[in-house]
Amino acid sequence: MMKQNIYDNEVFFENYKALREDPVNYNELLEQPEIKRMLPDLKGMRVIDIGCGMGDLAKYCVEQGAEHVTAIDPSSKMLQEARRRNSHPSIEYVQTALEDAVMTIDSYDIAVSSLVMHYVADYDAVIQSIHAALKEDGILLFSTEHPIVTARKEGDKWITDADGNRIHFAVDNYQEQGRRESKWYVDGVVYYHRSIAALCNGLIQNGFSLEEVTEPIPSEKAIAQLPRIEHELRRPSFIILKARKTARL
């Protein structure tokens, strides 16, 4: 499958950058706090940040004591921003897609990835690659779009009444896993739907032991800052999985 690099599309990139620069967004209020809570002690750790974007999480890791962070992303525009905003002697930024990344075997203590896995066509292959790159007892922690969100193939996901009020969220095509396509700033954004079972079993069957699975819930403070985030109480946008390397393949 051809790997998509939508983030180097000028229109997409400028809209996405504006979204992330506003501190009142779903990532900063919902997904990132849970990722940071679930990270293990980073002191002296070697970390690979997969899909590092503009480098915020990589910088956070070194600020928490990580010895070195290898931060990879396929987007030249993202990495240009990362080097400008979050440069640090302990961070190495590398332009590569996860599927193409050359990772030294048994070289990282922690692999972390924020909202990348739903763009990956071959989930088992990348989990195997990450497994090989982690040291014994290494941790893989990643967030992805929730399967409830990625399942429906077409049509509006929120069903509304005549006044535009959200009645319920429509889940369909859940067991029909695979490629999806949608419009997000631009047409033709490709992602991949996997069930919760597929996400979990892909880890278990490839040498990992699950330690925690969470579906982030907004705090009262987050709801006050961004009222529409209260809809997360009705259906989750994200799922985060934490697993430990426990077996050789």
Image (cartoon, helix red, strand yellow):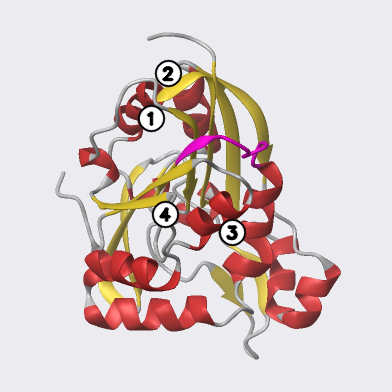
Of 248 and 170, which appears nearest the observer?
A: 248
Q: Position of residue 90 (x, y in %)?
A: 44, 49
- Which amino acid type corresponds to the residue marked 1 in the rendered image? Ile
The answer to whether 41 appears left or right of 203 in the picture is right
Q: Which of disc 1 and disc 3 is earlier in sequence?
A: 1
Q: Which residue is mark 4?
A: 89
Q: Residue furthest top?
A: 248
Mark nearer the viewer, 1 or 2: 1
Mark nearer the viewer, 4 or 1: 4
The secondary structure making up most of the magenta span is: loop
Q: Which residue is mark 2?
A: 206
Q: Is residue 42 visible?
A: yes
State the CA–CA distance, disc 3 to disc 2: 26 Å
- The segment highlighted magenta reads 39-47
- Which amino acid type corresponds to the residue marked 2 in the rendered image? Asn
The mark tally for this picture is: 4
Q: Which residue is mark 3?
A: 237
Q: Residue furthest bottom?
A: 163
Q: Residue furthest left?
A: 2
The answer to whether 172 appears left or right of 9 in the picture is right
Residue under the point 39% across and 62% down: 53
Q: Which residue is mark 1?
A: 130
Mark nearer the viewer, 4 or 3: 4
Q: Residue furthest front?
A: 89
